[in-house]
Image (cartoon, rainbow, N blue to C red):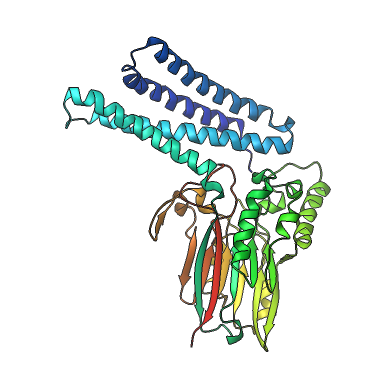
Amino acid sequence: MRSYSLFTIILLCIAILVIDILAFYWLQSITQFIASPIIRLSINILFWVFTIGLISSIIILKVRLDDINPIRKHLLISSFYGLAISSFIPKFIFVVVISILYFTNFILSDSESIIVVPIIGLFSGFLPFFVILYGIFKAAYRFKVHHHTILSKNLPKSFHGLRIVHISDIHLGSFNYRYAILEKAVKKINDLQPDYICMTGDLVNNFSWELHGWDKVFNKLKAKKGKFAVLGNHDYGDYSQWDSIKAKQENFNAIKQFYHDIGFKLLLNEAVIISENGEQIAIVGVENWGKPPFKQYGDLQKPLIHTNDIPFKILLSHDPTHWNEEVINKTDIALTLAGHTHGMQAAFQFKNQQWSPIKYKYRHWAGLYKLGTQYLNVNRGLGWLGFPGRLGMRPEITLIQLKGTD
């Protein structure tokens, strides 16, 4: 998780304070209907105690961040992130809605607006608040299986019907060692009876100590033919300050060793050729490749040198921007598996349509994409980072079935 400057944190606190002042102003139009002055006073006191407490805690946490135990630090950051979001967004919506209603009200009479406007305003604030609470306490771990079929004339007949489970962005540090939660995802994966399991990076948030005890969970994953993985931007430890280069390298080595311990073949700019009945496909994996500020460790050309004669290639690459920059129309890679975006952990979805602000940063941000004969699947992530929840963007397990065409 990246560290933000004190100036940025102060700006955030000012924004929270401004919205709370406006929300408090409009709240008086609602509390005026409460007959008891004691109850009205109590509401006002609780409102400002929460606001001042939240702002003070955020600033204190930032100032003392370096002195806090890393495990406790992540828990505190996520908690205050959740509190800030669940407080700021509902109040912001409340202020916007009730302001519009008051200043553009020309349909209702004065007597009607005294009752209707506060009710609508209050509802506009409470609804997103409960949606956010649901996203934090329920939806964050409601693992959803997405099914996709990939059709390709280049797929050898021996691999027709091959089942691949794609997972990504687990961010184990965010689970805070709650092993039973992820075991539910493991069961869903095993029930799909995959031939291969492919993991596309961000196993941790930053540190190898996040992996403690998780080997017992991951060793329960069952794949008939093999398990493969690549690294994501968070797996390199680039977002933390280290006492030495050696300490960072030891952390990195421990993460790579963990993959070996749980039976995953970690592909570091390399390819594995799989043979069935004399026919072949290749699984290619690159280290993290992303546009700045993300570092580019990936070298796609290195593994492709050894797969020129393979008719069907599957690429594991953490960042979906790689597909657009180096894959489509530049290689014959049939299927690319990526993650990274989390779908912003927030989206509006209706039937097969979905929208998220993340689309303005990433052209390909969630789901299956196709251009010509080349496919890209962007997994929405199995875990979370930052905001401790998911809004309309449930954690994803993807089942991909390969089918050949004549």
At which x and y percent is residue 259? 75, 60
Looking at this rendering, what residue extends furthest in the top direction? 37
Q: In this view, does 25 lie to the left or right of 53?
A: left
Report whether residue 47 is seen.
Answer: yes
Q: Is residue 190 above or below residue 140?
A: below
Query: In which quadrant is the N terminus drawn?
Result: top right
Residue drawn 54% across the image and 73% down it: 401
Residue 167 in view here: no
Image label count: 0
Instruction: Give the camera-side residue of 326 and 343.
Output: 343
Answer with the quarter of the image where residue 185 lies. bottom right
Q: Quadrant of residue 113?
A: top left
**Front residue (pair 101, 268):** 101
Q: In this view, does 215 lie to the left or right of 399?
A: right
Residue in the picture at 48% in, 66% down = 368
**Residue at x 51%, y 47% (from the top left corner):** 139
Left or right placement of residue 21 versus residue 136 in this view: left
Looking at this view, is 189 or 280 the one in front?
A: 189
Choose top left, top right, bottom left or bottom right for residue 240.
top right
Image position, residue 238 (x, y; %): 70, 48
- Furthest-right residue in view? 246
